[in-house]
Image (tube, helix red, strand yellow):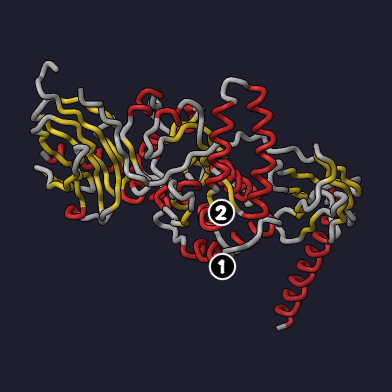
Amino acid sequence: MKFRCFFSGLFLVCALHSEAQAWDFDHISFKKADSLAMVNKGASLDDLPKLVYNLTNGLETDAERFRSIYLWVCTNVKNDYGLYAKNKRKRRRFQDDSLKLEAWNDRFKKRIFKTLLKRKRTICTGYAYMVKTLSQLANIDCEIINGFAKTSSGNPEDLRYPNHSWNAVKLNDKWYLSDPTWSSGVQDIDNGRFKFDYNDGLFLAPPKLFAINHFPLEAQWFLFNDTPPIFTGFLEAPIVYNEAYKLLAGHKTPQKLYNEVPRNYTLNLECLLKPNIKLKTITLEIDDGISSKIIVPDNFVLKNQKLFVKHILKNYGFYDIHLSINDQLVASYVFKVRRFSEE
Amino acid sequence: MKKIATSQNSTSNKVLLLMGFLFVATFLCNPLQAQNKSITVKGIVNSDIGPLDGVSIYLKNSKTGTVSKADGSFTFPSQLKAGDILIFSYLGYDKQSIVITETSSYLDIFMKEAPIDVLSAVNSNKRYKSKRPKKS
């Protein structure tokens, strides 16, 4: 019994360690770094070395220096929906003509940097480029990672070609992943407006959670110690929202967005939560296409930050099921419950 | 009493001798001594589209720096010495680090555009809605 306790404890420590990212820096206070980023709010991009000096002067560790740079970029650079829409349209048009695509990229690149410099507005690549450039000026190893990102639109069309850029940064000889674009704020697609709303969850995010909606072109940037995921698995993965990064340290099941199951199937939801989240703030919402209702699942357990939710899907139908914590959307799944088992 | 004074004398002599030795050794053994002369660095920054205006040029690990003029020319505001590193940085171009040597009084710098693919995905936090099968 003692051995069993010891090994399960050891397993938990290992599991938590493999997820550990921002937690690696729990012993460092980012207060000074954050205040430097705030003090320099509105600074211009005309003189990047000066900006880096002002953002990092007096900070002792690379983690703090990177934090100040990252927070400054995320709270000072706006997402430009017009540029995003134009680039998306053009890239789609030239997707089968590599020469035209390259020519467009060259032209557009100049415009992106001009807009960034003059108006501090950009799209994903501009965010990742800013973080990389400022970090390198602070002698921190940082890379732009290109790949696929799965957004809450769930539109498979968006994933035919690479559509997103984020960063990998090396701190104390270990690589970490961060997504400055999605950390920066929220885009209202209906009116094109961008609202700053810093999301700390995407700063040094847990690689396994990150891989649910980020698929790098080069597998090394998953930062997995074990086998990297395959693209089909990524396409089939559930929708994980930005808010999830604030609340989850990992997501285990369901592994697919779309699930076809027989009646009386038990939905099994398992995730690893960040510390200090209360069980009563967790809700499931079931939408059958006509109406939606918030339900109390049949079984809820929160143990050692591991959340287990079980709910029996008794009636046949087609359901969108949304998991929320603290009234914030975390993940969505689709369940088609068959009427007859052979259907 | 006399003995103590003598021993104090010999100790201070030893210290003086050691300091003298160190002083001479510093001059004799320092190969960088010849390189320590000050250099005024001037130059021009060019790119594919011609001279670059507003390139930040600064001495690594310091706040000392300048920016290039409209014709791409610059004069570094402080005297440099061999071994110093100048960083050239401009938004949209790859950063360049140049190690100063005794012959670095005029630098002709060519800045290369950053080789990036412009990509973008917007996350709106909008609730996911599945495409439902049409009822037959």
Residue B70 seen by the camera: yes
Q: Residues within 10 Å of mark 2 (few under 14, many from 20)?
A: many
- Compared with A224, A33 (above or below) is below
Q: Amino acid at mark 1?
A: Val
Q: Find residue A209 and report its horizontal and vertical position in percent.
A: 36, 39
Q: Secondary structure at mark 1?
A: helix
The answer to whether B108 appears left or right of A14 in the picture is right
**Residue A83 placement (x, y as % from top left):** 58, 43
- Find residue A77 and name its label: 2
Sooner in the amino-acid sequence: mark 2 or mark 1: 1
Viewer-side residue, B46 vs A59: B46
Give me the chain letter of mark 1.
A
Residue drawn at the location 72% of the way across and 59% of the way down: B62
The image quadrant where one finds the C terminus of chain A is top left
Which chain is indicated by disc 2? Answer: A
Residue found at the very far top of the displayed protein? A342
On the picture, is A189 further left or further right than A5? Answer: right
Coordinates of residue A140 in the picture (x, y in percent):
59, 47
Residue A8 visible: no
